[in-house]
Image (cartoon, grey):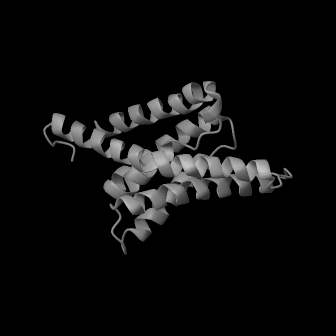
Amino acid sequence: MIYAFSFTVTLVLVLLQSIVLTVWLPFAGFYDLLIPVVLYLAIFRSAGEAVLILPMMGLLMDSVTGGPFGLYILTYVWLLAGIRAIIRYIHGTSIVFLFIAVIVGVTVEANIFWVAQLLAGRTWVVWPDTLGHLVWQLVFAGVTGPFLMLATKALFQKLVYWLGGRIA
């Protein structure tokens, strides 16, 4: 049941990101809304659940975006591994950590995409417009990301409560 719920949350966020937010001009190029969900899985759920859910999330994003296949899966796996390593040493549930984690997650994804562009042979130079776009994404990620992560946590807790704790 947790996997069906995760797939539903992923599908809703992908549709929101690819259809709804692209209609509104100020939100064109909004950061990847699945990053807070990936970070939620890395911080608050077991490693087994995250390892089973993340490839599905990455596969869905890879199939919708039309970019190089496997790029989102790679990004999500790196974020999972990095956050799981970090939370062994620090308290990962504070709001400050969630804020920093979302900003770092968006930055890591942007860097992975940039390296993929370079490896594909596309000459992609960092222009001021590109940096402005990244700053725009980081600001929105910092403002909305921790709340999206906490909302995902609340949704999962409600699901566990509704099902009587059978999928904790």
Residue found 60% across the figure and 32% down from its top: 64
Count of numbered tags: 0
Q: Nearer the viewer, residue 126 or 162?
A: 126
Residue found 46% across the figure and 31% down from its top: 11
Tell me: residue 168, above or below residue 61.
below
Q: Nearer the viewer, residue 16 or 52?
A: 16
Q: Position of residue 160 (x, y in %)?
A: 21, 41
Q: Nearer the viewer, residue 28 or 118?
A: 28
Q: Residue furthest bottom?
A: 89
Relative to 4, 68 lies left or right? right
Q: Residue furthest left?
A: 164
Tell me: residue 148, above or below residue 74.
above
Residue found 65% across the figure and 38% down from its top: 29
- Residue 12, image quadrant: top left
- Residue 38 in view (yes/no): yes
Q: Position of residue 107 (x, y in %)?
A: 60, 57
- Residue 115, image quadrant: bottom right
Tell me: residue 134, above or below residue 100.
above
Q: Nearer the viewer, residue 1 or 44?
A: 44
- Quadrant where the N terminus sits is top left
Relative to 131, 166 lies left or right? left
Q: Position of residue 66 (x, y in %)?
A: 68, 35
- Residue 73 in view (yes/no): no
